[in-house]
Amino acid sequence: MVEIVQRQPSLEIAPLEIAPLEISETPPSAGRDLGLDFIKGILIVLVVFGHSIQWIVHARTDAYWSDGLFKAIYLFHMPAFIAISGYLAARKIDATTRFGEFLFRRTLPLLLAMAIWAGVLAWPNLSRAVVGLETHVLSDVWKDFRGSYWFLWAVVVGSAGAFAATRFAAYERAALLIVAALLLAPFPDYPLAAIRYTASFYLVAYLAGRAGMTIRSIRPSIAGAMAAVAALGWLFWTRDTYIYNNGLAYWRAGVAGQVALMLPVAVAATLAFSRAAIALHDRIARSATARILIAIGGMTLEIYLAQTVVFRAASPPPDFAAGYLDAAAATAIIVAGLAGVVALSRRLPGGGLLWGRLPALRLPALPFRARND
């Protein structure tokens, strides 16, 4: 039986140190599975490589939708990325988490970082004249705050869903109901469709973490079967199968089949990739490559925020032509360069503000209702 308790109001002032969400957590805490940071390192490299394919290999065209390598990456990389974040949140969002802690420590810092970088993205346009009553602060900055960092909105939505679910005794059922609501919500437009699609992966992985499941517990035979499903799905994956194009609009003619293909293939590819990546980590854990990827995995939030500016600023000249090796070289340069910038900025006074790290705040302890787990 679950007991409901009421904490008494307190006049004690409790310190609250602001920290980022699980998408970036550096340095790794004691007892943390470095294999998860290793996976995150691979995933952020794939994010930059996917954008490099789009902006460099297929500059000025939309042929990337049918690019086989681009397609293989986009089967799983964002679902896997947010699933790792949700899995890590299982240790930090529970029935004892206070609303003030959740809001000021886990949500507002991320929103602040998104707002800052949305302003950086829109800066070249801010000098233009005001058109009517609409300023470019409202148009350009809001557009980037809402759309360019949609993935971080998905983290916010997913973590809010996890927090809401833990207010109920049957939090597993509540979380699954939230997942169903996200997938069935009639909002097909970008970025809402991408947000509700990936946030559902966050919540499912959160439940897996709460249940004590681990990536290593996935049997190799299961992972192999999932890889086969993903490979088969890759063969039938088209431009309309991407979440950006089908919008989870299952009620529209011709879209339901694409959604029915996308969801199981994305799940299968995420499981297969995660199991393969953790196995690779365990094999090469002591190597320099593993240490580098683990270090990069601790900077995923920062690299994700800044790489968007890099690609926005890049404008290939006319008749520009490049291949996958050029995209790979650009990826290495961008990731290494941004990692250096992040490491340097962390040493500067106030540098953490760029990445959603606010100085320590002191907030009053508030009464709240919670159940005992």
Image (cartoon, rainbow, N blue to C red):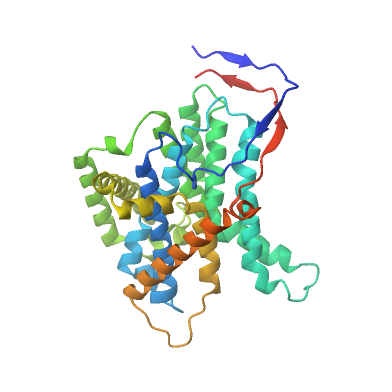
The residue nearer to you, when weighing 149 against 244, is 149
Q: Is residue 93 visible?
A: yes
The picture quadrant where one finds residue 105 is top right
The residue nearer to you, when weighing 51 against 33, is 33
Residue 65, image x, y percentages: 39, 68
* Outermost residue toward the bottom in this view: 319
Q: Is residue 189 visible?
A: no
Residue 237, image x, y percentages: 32, 61
3 lies left or right of 76: right
Residue at the location (52% across, 79% down)? 315
The residue nearer to you, when weighing 188 against 198, is 198
Residue 82, image x, y percentages: 45, 47
Residue 361, image x, y percentages: 69, 38
108 lies left or right of 182: right
14 lies left or right of 315: right
* Outermost residue toward the right in this view: 133
